[in-house]
Image: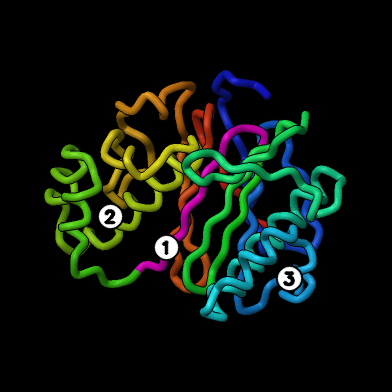
Amino acid sequence: MATGAVQDVRVRVAVCPERPCAPGADEVCAWVVDLARPPVHPNELFTRLTPEERVRAERYRIAKAREQFVIGRGLLRGLLGELLDTAPAAVPLVYLPSGKPILAGTNAPLHFNITHTDGVLVLVAGRRRVGVDVECVRAMDDAEGLVARYFSAAEATAFRALPEAQRPLAFFRGWTCKEAVIKAAGATVGCLAEFDVELDPARPPRVNAVRAPQLTGPGWALTEWLAPGNAAVALAVEGATELVMGREE
């Protein structure tokens, strides 16, 4: 995998298929899943899980949460299995201390991430570290308090300087972008205030400053889009100067 920055990384956004295409060297694939209509039936996805994951799924007392877990983990294993040419249950997943799943014991330079919110799940895969987050845009009575608690001082100042009408979008822009970066880095929410992202919805998303050692390196590029259901999606990619969006049917 190239570790230096490149001029462009193409981001291919598509509805999640049953069989994905592998991302190219300077490419990230993002697959959007309607949790009410996944491309594979949940019963079949359950068979893709490891015995430990099946036990974990059955421990969920709420059926909706159990199904979301099965769909997410089953699709992830299916996608990785296709890309690695191995059985889904045999995909060697291990977990960082942050809880981020990664591949172990493979020479394939493949990075991935997964996120979901009510009704929408997003999977991403690429040849460099990637992170993704999705949140349904909605009214937030405590947005300013959350910004003061979790965002950096510079971001809190920038948030308060925005017109009130722009603050809801600014909050979800900031939250999803920050989550995408820490997920890509395998960091934790303890780093949320240790870097700054652009909150102004009128400006392109970007990382403005980094203070956390876990986030330093070749840099992080950001992009965003709206998924069905008014869901804000943010994607972070390591070692790119620009992300070029492309959509596929």
Screen quadrant of the N terminus: top right
Q: Main secondary structure of the magenta part?
A: strand
Secondary structure beneath dot 1 equals: strand
Q: Residue 135: say if magenta.
A: yes
Note whether 237 is above or below 174 in the view shown.
above
> Which stretch appears magenta?
127-137
Q: Which residue is mark 3?
A: 39
Mark nearer the N terminus (2 vs 1): 1
Amino acid at dot 3: Pro
Q: Nearer the viewer, mark 2 or mark 1?
A: 1
Residue 176, image x, y percentages: 39, 52
Q: Residues within 10 Å of mark 1 (few under 14, many from 20)?
A: many
Amino acid at dot 1: Glu
Screen quadrant of the C terminus: bottom right
Q: Residue 73: say if magenta.
A: no
Residue 228 vs residue 104, the one in the foreground? 104
Q: Residues within 10 Å of mark 3 (few under 14, many from 20)?
A: some
Q: Is residue 249 visible?
A: no
CB atoms at circles 3 and 2 under 8 Å apart? no
Q: Residues within 10 Å of mark 2 (few under 14, many from 20)?
A: many
Note whether 63 is above or below 238 in the view shown.
below
Q: Which residue is mark 2?
A: 170
